[in-house]
Image (tube, rainbow, N blue to C red):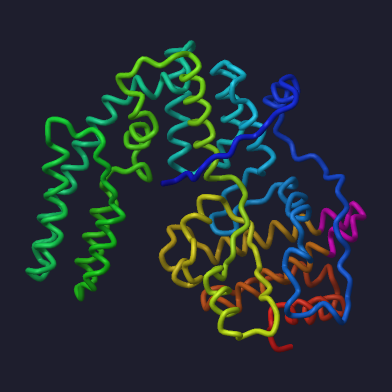
Amino acid sequence: MRIGAIQNFNIGSIGTYRSKLSERVYPQSTIQADSFQKSSSVSFGTRFETLFPSAFFRKILKEGVSCAYTNIPLIPKEDFRVLEALEGLNVPIHLDLAYLNKYKPNLYSMEQKVLKFLNAESKKHPNRTIAELMIAKCQSAEKTMRVKQVENLNKLIVEARALPKEDFSSLRFFAMDYVKRLTSQNPQGIILDPKKLSALVKDMNIKDKKLEKTLLKRIDKIPSEENSLDAYIYERVKLAQGTELSQREKEQLSHKISLNILSPSVASDEHFYPQALYRAEESSGKHKGEPFRVSFLTSKYMNEIKRDMKPDDFIEACEFDVPLNLQEHINRLTEIHSKWRAEHKSKDADKLAQYILTLKLEAEKRSKYVTLDISALEKMLGAEKLKDYTGLIKGFLDINV
C-alpha cells in the first residue's frame, strides 16, 4: 500500500483554515535554533535529536527542500495538517482541487496521474465531489484493470516456460490461480499483489539473469495501484461502488482521497542505516553508549519502501538514482546555509553546516556507492571551523578521527 494510517487533526477556527487554501508559502520561522556547544561531554552516545531537534528540521522544510532519495519536493507536515483540518467543512470541489494543484510538483507520478484525471473530470462534472468522480469511473476502471492483469499473467506463463520444471510449475500454479479468479463471474474483492510474484521469482535464484529480468519486467506491467490509474481508482472507491452514499459520506471519502494524494510526499525523518541494525548493535554491546541515529529528510513514501533495507541494497533496488539525489539534497541544504548566513542567522547556519557534514560522513560510512561533494560549504566555513566541526561529528558517528 502506498498510504499508511492517516491521523485526525483538531481545528479551532474554520475561517483560519479556509483562508489557508489560497496560501503556499514558506514563512520564516520564529523558533530559535538550539546552539551547538562544543563540550567534552558531547561525544559518541549523544542523541541525534539532542543536537538536531524537530524545530531545526521544520525550519529547513519551510525553506523548501526535496526528498534526499528522489529529489521530489517535500510537503511539510504542517501543510498536510491544514488539509487534514478541512474534514467536515464541505469544501467545494474547485477549492479542493485548487489546494491539491498547488502541490503538483511535489507529487509522485501516480498521484500526478490521479490529479490530472480529477482536473479533467471536474471540468465535465463541476458539481461532483472527488469521490463521485472516482466512483463514476470505478466500473470501467476495474474492467480495464482485470483485462490487463489477465493478459500479463498469461504472457508471464508463456515467458516462464524456460524455467526449470519445478520453478515453472510453482509460478504457473500461482499465476493460473489468479487468472481463474480474475475471469470468474464475480472477481470483485480479489487483490492481485504483483510484489508476491516478484518475490517468488527472486527466491528461485534463477541462473539465467536475462530470463529473470524478463519475468520481473513482465510482472511490473501487471496493473496495481503502484503503476495503474485504473487500479488506483478501483482500490480507493471499490467499497463504495454500487452503494448509495449520503452527502456526508461522499465528503468524507473525498477528503480521504485528497489526503492519499498528498500523503506519499509528506516529509519524514528516515534512517539511512536501519533502526533494526542499530538495535542489534545495542543488544550486542558493540558500543558503550547509544548510537548516533542519523535522520535524513525523505518522503513518507520512500520511508515506507526502504524500511529496514541496508543502504546499498536499497540503492541497488531503488528506481531513483539515490547517490545523485543525495548530492542534490546536499546542494540545496548548502544553498539554505548560504542564505541564512546572508540573513545573519549564524546559529541556524552553523547548525545546518554541522548537519550537512553529518549527512556526508554518515552516507559515505554506510554506502560504497555514495561520495558527496561539499566543497561549496567548505569554502564558506573556512579550514579551522571545518576541521573543528568534522572532528566533533566523527566523534558522534564513532569514526576514527
Could you tell me what secondary structure mostly forms the magenta stretch? helix
**Residue 213 percent coordinates (x, y):** 25, 64
Residue depicted at x 35% and y 44%: 227
**Relative image position of residue 240 (x, y in whole percent):** 36, 24
Relative placement, left or right, of 293 versus 2 is right
Q: Is residue 399 left or right of residue 130?
A: right
Q: Quadrant of the C terminus?
A: bottom right
Q: How many marks?
A: 0
**Outermost residue, bottom side:** 400
Query: In the picture shown, does residue 92 fall above or below 380?
Result: above
Does 339 lie within the magenta span?
A: yes
The image quadrant of residue 141 is top left
Determine whether, in the image, residue 159 is placed left or right of residue 357.
left
Instruction: Give the residues drawn in magenta, as a range.
Output: 338-350
Q: Indicate the position of residue 52 as horizontal and vertical percent values.
A: 76, 62
Q: Residue furthest right?
A: 344
